[in-house]
Image (cartoon, rainbow, N blue to C red):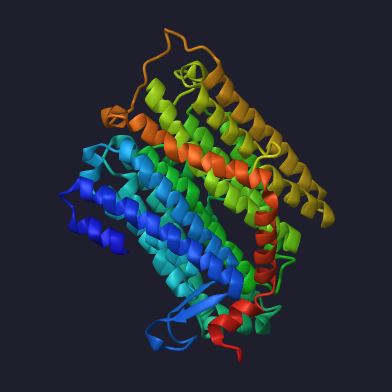
Amino acid sequence: ITTAALCLMAWRHPEAQRRLGLIGTDAWLGVGGALLDGVAGDGPAAVQMGAWPAPFGITIAADLFSAVLVLLTGLVGFGVSIYALGDLGAERETYGFHPLFHALLTGVCGAFVTGDIFNLYVWFEVMVIASFGLITLGGYTRQIDGGVKYVLLNLMATTFLLVAIGLLYGLTGTLNMADLALVAPAFEGDGRMTAVAVLFLIAFAMKAAAFPLHFWLPASYHTPAVAVSAIFSGLLTKVGVYSLIRTYTLIFTAEPGFTHQIVLWVGAITMLVGILGAISQSDIRRIFAFNLVSGIGFILIGVGLNTVLGLTGALFYTVHHIVVMAALFLASGVAQRMAGAFTLETLGGLYRDRPYFALVFFVLAMSLAGVPPLSGFWPKVLLVKASLDAEAYWIAAIALVTSLLTLYTMGKVWALAFWRSRSASAPKPAGVPEIDLKLRPGSLSTLAVPVVALATISVIIGLWAEPLMALSGEAAVGLLDPRGYISAVLGPSG
């Protein structure tokens, strides 16, 4: 939030805002690394704001899961900040990209570390305000159309969340999540608590773009500047996923045969609907948007299985998905700079023009599809094995079919945009604002740097999967047995 405030103070000085943005995200990356190192060594940590003891005051808490997500927020934020140096024209910068961007990152990290469920709602509101400003930045018709769809569904989600929070407080008398973990078991078999759990599921499913509340995402994520699409794809839906995982492992655990079974069904249908939507698209950003929806389904089935192995796969997949989806959206912007459009009908011949970039894109596409030994392969193996162990054979089958269809969609993008020769009579790109096609001197290489860096991280995760797998497993155990988290927030007597 300090960086956002400094960028506001430097409103008339875009160059100063760029420098502040890079420094801020770099510092965020360092703080995220220190937080993860501390939590990994000493266990969950908590801070009580204003010296008010929990559960009465505002709690900031972090365990392995939230610490990993804070680190990834810094990583993706830093990469997008570098990309924005070559992506954004002065027009968008003067409309407030930098302060809005850092306000969005503040909301995301606030949601990851809050220990109070009402403050989770507050951070959601911060994200909605900042993201609406970012998605409409520039004021083009297609952005306004996408922004209206985006903000309406997100306002509905926050309304459901606020109602659910009110009902939860009425039942339990507390909103501190660690305290709720102690109080909630007393409501086992109480239909009121189950109804509240379903309300939270609806709210978080809207935020995560899960079926049948997913349609706002592919209708809006292809409309803003590429840097904005990338940060949205990497982080925003993961806040909904994080919130669902947190509440469904900490609070709503009394009726898993009902609540988690719903999550399992929603996840399976989300996988299929997302990938079928991707098959029907020709705009590469819309293809990636539908693949993003499908990936949320993979995470949800791990939550729905409610086992250590299933949750390990879900957490591993979350890390992979953040890195790869952000990189793919950034790569789509590089492809547009080369060919002048996002549509497969216009793209072509990129392998001949930029073979090294084509190789980087191929690695990212195959990682999303789950081709071994890249980063997307290992979490899918874990999720399929967890499904088979739970005798949920239909879940394993849907996951495998979805992976094959993902490979088909990524292969189609590669074949048409990169391998196929570009026709001299290809249609001119239509509906692309002139500002999108303006480049600063030398900025094509600037755009490629974060894409290559994120692709390299994906390869490293795939080739050396054991550390992340062990970390995900430890985080999953901590989520399913939250005594360490509760103790950190409420003290040993809690």
- In this orientation, which residue lies closer to the viewer: 395 or 161? 395
Is residue 276 visible to us here?
yes
Q: Residue at x 28, y 36 (%)?
A: 140
- Residue sitting at the far top: 424
- In this orientation, which residue lies closer to the viewer: 487 or 276? 487
The x and y percentages for residue 399 are 72, 43
Q: Residue at x 43, y 37 (%)?
A: 449
Q: Is residue 265 found left or right of 101 in the rendered image?
A: right
Q: Residue at x 47, y 12 (%)?
A: 422
Q: How many marks?
A: 0
The x and y percentages for residue 481 are 69, 74
Q: Residue at x 25, y 36 (%)?
A: 89
Q: Is residue 471 found left or right of 123 in the rendered image?
A: right
Q: Quadrant of the N terminus?
A: bottom left
The x and y percentages for residue 326 are 49, 43
- Residue sitting at the far bottom: 493
Is residue 239 visible to us here?
no
Q: Is residue 206 found left or right of 480 in the rendered image?
A: left
- In this orientation, which residue lies closer to the viewer: 141 or 450? 450
The x and y percentages for residue 328 are 50, 37
Q: Quadrant of the C terminus?
A: bottom right
Q: With respect to residue 492, does 351 lie above or below?
A: above
